[in-house]
Amino acid sequence: MVLTHTTNHTYNHPFPTVTLAFFLRYCSPQLNPFASHVLSTDTISSHVDPDTGRLHTTRIHLKKSRMPPAVMKLLPTSITGGTTDKASYILETSVVDMREGWMSTESRNLNFVGALSVVERQLYAAPTEAADAGKTDVETKVVFRSRLGERIRDKIGHPIQQSTQENGWFARLGARGIQRSIESLASTKTLDQLGKSREGMRIILEKLRHTGIIGVLELRKRARERGMEAI
Amino acid sequence: MSQSLAKQCNEVKERYDTCFLKWYSEKYLRGAASAESNECTTLFKEYSACLQGALKERGIDKLLDDAREDNKENDATFLGRKKCQMRIPGH
């Protein structure tokens, strides 16, 4: 089963600023109030391709309960560990091409992938029309895929392995029905989150417009110092 | 402030992030970056060395390998299709 959702949006900010906001979007809840669910962000690789001049970056984010609680409730405890409040590791890869004026990004969850894999791909591009200068278009495509029970279904041909608890659970509810429910629940939640993530980008873009990157870095530094005092 | 996955890497991560954001906005976006040399490379090496242990400890290195495998499989599945089927819930 696969569920795909595509949306388009235009930011009223120039392409370079939008790409900077992308890298800054989880940098501080003071900068982006919609990022409070992001527990950590780490860069695991970053390099400029000498042939193309493209910047390739890989980051790992730890986010609170990426799996919608309703989905967690559908899953057997053998998969969830009995909790509905788990954090997910998100792998984010991005490529920026300043010469050609585009940025492509991909985010995917690293854990629970068998139950639900969510892959979000975005393409940011400077508009080709001169009248749209200073704007940035973004196309977002999210693919939801649940493979829950697929391996177990494969086993059904082997009667010896049929008596496990999971087999009983899937046989009762129907793996396909469960997969569809998971994909559709996740998609509804993600649509809501897309709006929030766009709003977060907008707030950062406004701050960049008013204070520039140095101002934003200063704000980030002050927020960190305040955080340290609080400890 | 967004933290590092590993507390012990917070300080070097912070220095690297600041360096990267400055380099990105002042050099890369202005077309003045060179692929070979980058003032953040040394900081990145330090940060990366700190992070490696944490990635291993939490099994993230293994998850990354799985994601790469999964990617290959997805590419094989989706690139073969002419057009992805689209369903927009609530529309």
Image (spheres, rainbow, N blue to C red):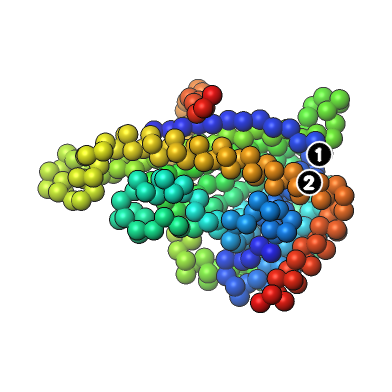
Horizontal side of A221 relative to A39 (left or right) equals: right
Q: Residue A7, position in %: x, y?
A: 62, 30
Q: Is residue A231 visible?
A: yes
Front residue of this view, candidates B28 and A49:
B28
Report which residue position mark 1 lands on: A13
Circles 2 and 1 in contact, beta carbons < 8 Å: yes
Horizontal side of A82 relative to A126 (left or right) equals: left
Residue type marked 1:
His
Residue at 74% from the left image edge and 43% from the top image edge? A202
Q: Residue A50, position in %: x, y?
A: 73, 49
Residue type marked 2:
Leu
Total labels drawn:
2
Residue at 61% from the left image edge and 66% from the top image edge? B4
Around disc 1, counting alpha carbons within 10 Å, would you say few (fewer than 14), some (14 to 19), or many (20 or more)?
A: some
Report which residue position mark 2 lands on: A205
Front residue of this view, candidates A77 and A154:
A77
Around disc 2, counting alpha carbons within 10 Å, would you say few (fewer than 14), some (14 to 19), or many (20 or more)?
A: many
Which chain is mark 2 on? A
Q: Residue A37, position in %: x, y?
A: 58, 56
For residue A94, the mark is none
Horizontal side of B69 relative to A11 (left or right) equals: left
The local secondary structure at tag 2 comes to helix
